[in-house]
Image: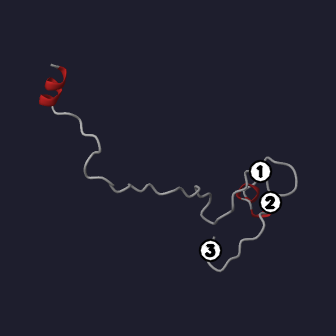
Amino acid sequence: MTPGRTQGKASCEECFFHKNMLCAVSGSGPCATFRPAHPEGLRPPSQLRFVFRQERRLQVAWPFPSADEQVALHA
């Protein structure tokens, strides 16, 4: 959407598929496949950005026993 332009109701006349004569739906009003017609063509839908979480702990809560501790435990 361009700045200063208000978003109105979707109509068949503003659909990419209708403007390019690719619409196969007969009926009035926009359908579930409505995509706004932009001069540069179809745009993929915006996706969420992947953000890495910061490490919350610097030390593990239950550390694994060392090799020497394992031998002593099972001896």
Cα distance, mark 1 to mark 2? 9 Å
Q: Quarter holding the N terminus?
A: bottom right
Which quadrant of the view contains residue 69? Answer: top left
Q: Where is residue 55 in the image (x, y as percent from the top left)?
A: 32, 54
Name the mark on residue 2: 3
**Which residue is at the far left?**
68
Residue type at mark 2: give it. Cys
- Amino acid beneath label 1: Cys
Out of 74 and 5, give the one closest to the viewer. Answer: 74
Q: Where is residue 38 in the image (x, y as percent from the top left)?
A: 65, 65
Say which residue label 2 marks: 12
The residue beneath circle 1 is 23
Indicate which disc, 2 or 3, sits on the residue closer to the N terminus: 3
The residue depicted at 76 percent of the width and 70 percent of the height is 8
> Does 73 sit above or below residue 53?
above
**Amino acid type, residue under disc 3 in the picture:** Thr
Q: Which of marks 3 and 1 is nearer the N terminus?
A: 3
